[in-house]
Image (spheres, helix red, strand yellow):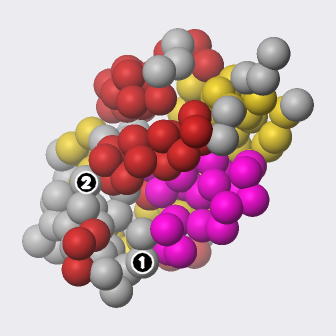
Amino acid sequence: MYRIGIGYDIHKLTSGRDLIIGGVKITHEKGLLGHSDADVLIHAIIDALLGALALSDIGTIFPDNDPQYKGADSTILLKKVYEIVRKKGYAIENIDSNIIAQSPKMMPYIPKMKLGLSKILDIEINRISIKAKTKEELDSVGKNLAIESNAVVLLKNQAK
């Protein structure tokens, strides 16, 4: 049996924070504001994984009022969610995702993001798609006030 999930996240850009997307530190004058490291791509993937299994969302599993997640590395949160996926008997078939940012340019960082995600999720790089999009200077993302991401995952039950 297959299950599909969709995830979405957005965070405000702010001074004084590192910009971490897809587990990769990106050179930029601003970072994303959030309780954890605010990694929009990983948060969207986590929500897609949880959604595929009808297990709520990232905020329910890792509440933003819980001090243990203050400044949390989202790759660690992703590992925990992937363990849940495996315990439920599923494997990831593929991930399709978008990072939507007016700046900085994401394309130079995408190969490193895919490599890191493939190691965490134990899947081949060619099963992970990360696309970079802009908002053509429209809305909060287009005006460099925020960065957003969305992701779709397909899970396959491993029962024989």
Q: Is residue 43 magenta?
A: yes
Label 1 crowd bin: few (<14), some (14–19), many (20+), radius 10 Å: some
* Residue at image mark 1: 63
Magenta extent: 42-61
In this orientation, does residue 131 appear? no
Task: Point out residue 1 in the picture as x, y percentages from the top left corner.
Answer: 88, 31
Q: Is residue 146 magenta?
A: no
Q: Quadrant of residue 108?
A: top left
Main SS, magenta region, reads helix
Q: Name which of mark 1 and mark 2 comes first in the sequence.
A: 1
Residue found at x 33% / y 45% = 75
Question: Of the residues shown, which amino acid type is indicated by label 2?
Answer: Asp
* 97 relative to 29, above or below: above
Question: Of the residues shown, which amino acid type is indicated by label 1?
Answer: Pro
Residue 73 — which label? 2
In this orientation, does residue 121 appear? yes
- Tell whether 49 sits left or right of 146: right
Task: Point out residue 97 in the picture as x, y percentages from the top left corner.
Answer: 61, 41
Task: Point out residue 105 in the picture as x, y percentages from the top left corner.
Answer: 37, 42
Task: Point out residue 67 in the picture as x, y percentages from the top left corner.
Answer: 23, 80
Residue found at x 85% / y 33% = 2
* 128 relative to 47, above or below: above
Of badges 1 and 2, nearer the viewer stands: 1
The image quadrant where one finds the C terminus is: top right
Front position in the image: 110 or 103: 110
Element under disc 1: loop
